Amino acid sequence: TESRDLSGKTVLITAGPTREKIDPVRFLTNHSTGKMGYAIAGEAVRMGAKVILVSGPVSLAPPKGAEVIKVESAEEMYQTALAHFAEADVLIGTAAVADYRPKYIFDEKMKKKEGDQALELERTKDILFELGQRKEAQVIVGFAAETNDVEKHAMGKLTRKNADMIVANDVKQAGAGFGADTNIVTIYKKDGSKDELPLMAKTEVARRLLSEVVLLLKKDESK
Ligand code: PMT
């Protein structure tokens, strides 16, 4: 028996990497494949949700039943997520959004020259933070890709980004984080509790995380 605990709910998910253009042939990006976000989207559909998946460039097949909106840059991802935030009951940020982008995009391919070349970068918007500021009744779940002091950084993100839950993965552990079909996560909640999960398939991480989301939605409804 499948749980349809998300029926009637709209779940907005960001997934994958972003691409920040340098010139017509080059960009800055990272190792995200979208697997974590697409797994959550698939599970949320199975649980009855309307799913809007805002995805950076990945090579995965779109999850059946989800509305997929493809974007490239952090700015596009931000604008698209913002446009759908008001209709969402749940926001889950799995995307590895670039924190910096080239300050100038060259119109023509950069030519090589003698010596070093510096690239000036500017900050992008923090999507989770921006939407956290606009939070009404939404349940907000962030991810944290850390390489050290996982707990400290995860708890910092929980408060700073006005999130209800942070799912931390130590991306230096084998079988966790970028690219793998599995993940090793610890779920940090606003009440200070944490749930350390062993290595499991990203689909199973998705199920665990969404069942926590269902509990939070029920709590809100009983208020
Ligand atoms: O895609 P996969 O290959 O399956 O890999 C999965 C993953 C490692 C990308 C995923 O599990 C993960 O950890 N995603 C978050 C990656 C990240 O950028 O973490 P962060 O600690 O830098 O960001 C914290 C949170 O803020 C995240 O929810 C992120 O989506 C969000 N953020 C960050 C920066 C920014 N400009 N906008 C954001 O919304």
Image (spheres, rainbow, N blue to C red):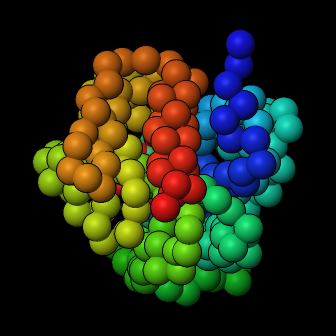
Q: Quadrant of residue 156?
A: bottom left
Tell whether 198 sits left or right of 147. Answer: right
Q: Quadrant of residue 203?
A: top right
**What percent of the width, then of the height, locates residue 148?**
16, 45
Q: Is residue 111 above or below residue 97?
A: below
Q: Is residue 129 above or below residue 221?
A: below
Q: Nearer the viewer, residue 113 or 156?
A: 156
Q: Look at 54% across and 47% down and name the residue there.
A: 218
Q: Quadrant of the N terminus?
A: top right
Q: Quadrant of residue 77?
A: bottom right
- Total marks placed: 0
**What percent of the width, then of the height, locates residue 198?**
31, 19
Tell whether 53 sits left or right of 186. Answer: right
Q: Look at 30% across and 62% down and name the residue there.
A: 157
In the picture as drawn, the residue positioned furthest to the top comes out as 1
Q: Nearer the viewer, residue 205 or 127?
A: 205
Tell whether 138 sits left or right of 11. Answer: left
**What percent of the width, then of the height, locates residue 51?**
75, 48
In the picture as drawn, the residue positioned furthest to the bottom comes out as 104
Q: Look at 43% across and 17% down and name the residue there.
A: 200
Q: Nearer the viewer, residue 87 or 166?
A: 87
**What percent of the width, then of the height, locates residue 67?**
83, 50
Q: Look at 31% across and 49% down and name the residue there.
A: 189
In the picture as drawn, the residue positioned furthest to the front comes out as 222
Q: Is residue 5 above or below residue 135?
A: above
**Residue 96, visible in the rendered structure:** no
**Residue 7, visible in the rendered structure:** yes
Q: Is residue 178 above or below residue 116?
A: above
